[in-house]
Image: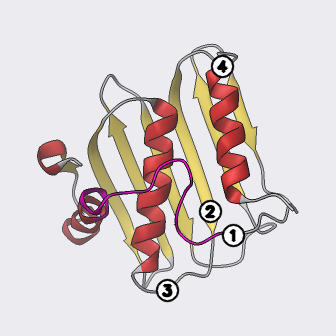
Amino acid sequence: MTTLNDLHRSVRAALSSGRVGTPVFVRYLFHRAIDGPILVTRLACITAVVRDWLGQPLERVYALGSLESRHITLTLEFRGGPTALVTWVGGAGRGAGVDLSILGNRGAIYHDAGTSELWDEPAQSDAVAPDQGLRAWIERALASRRPEGAGAQP
């Protein structure tokens, strides 16, 4: 059975190969029935993984949605221009996994969860564990409902 960390490592390997050139945009959509504070930890883990893939410091976070609405989207802006959308939907989606698109300046990577069965580890990544600063940054963006800049960047 494939794990989420396996998917993340595969993407990292594909990006390292240079086949897509420099990554400039990531869309990471995941469906999970998550409640409480674990959600912000999961969002921080995914944000850290995306930051690692893009290889640039995060400069701005903008959050829309809420735990109550069962939908949150983070718009992430990175130094040098790359951007990302990280979206959580708190209901059942197609399959049990992640829909992912990564656009580079010479190609793209796609993963559609479809009917795949990705085993869901605890909200940690073997690649990049988020620090409390990144988690707090996402919490501020969710609370303020406006872009939060890199002043308190982790």
Q: Position of residue 25 (x, y in %)?
A: 51, 33
Looking at the rendered structure, which numbered label has been put on residue 30? Answer: 2
Q: Secondary structure at mark 2?
A: strand
Q: CA distance from mark 4 to mark 2?
A: 23 Å
94 or 116: which is nearer to us?
116
Identify residue for label 1: 120
Sooner in the amino-acid sequence: mark 3 or mark 4: 4
Q: Secondary structure at mark 3?
A: loop
Q: CA distance from mark 1 to mark 2?
A: 11 Å
Give amino acid for label 3. Answer: Asp
Identify residue for label 3: 35
Q: Which residues are magenta?
A: 120-135
Looking at the rendered structure, which numbered label has been put on residue 20? Answer: 4
Sooner in the amino-acid sequence: mark 2 or mark 3: 2
40 or 131: which is nearer to us?
131
Please check the rendered image and state whether residue 123 is part of the magenta-colored stretch, yes or no.
yes
Sooner in the amino-acid sequence: mark 4 or mark 2: 4
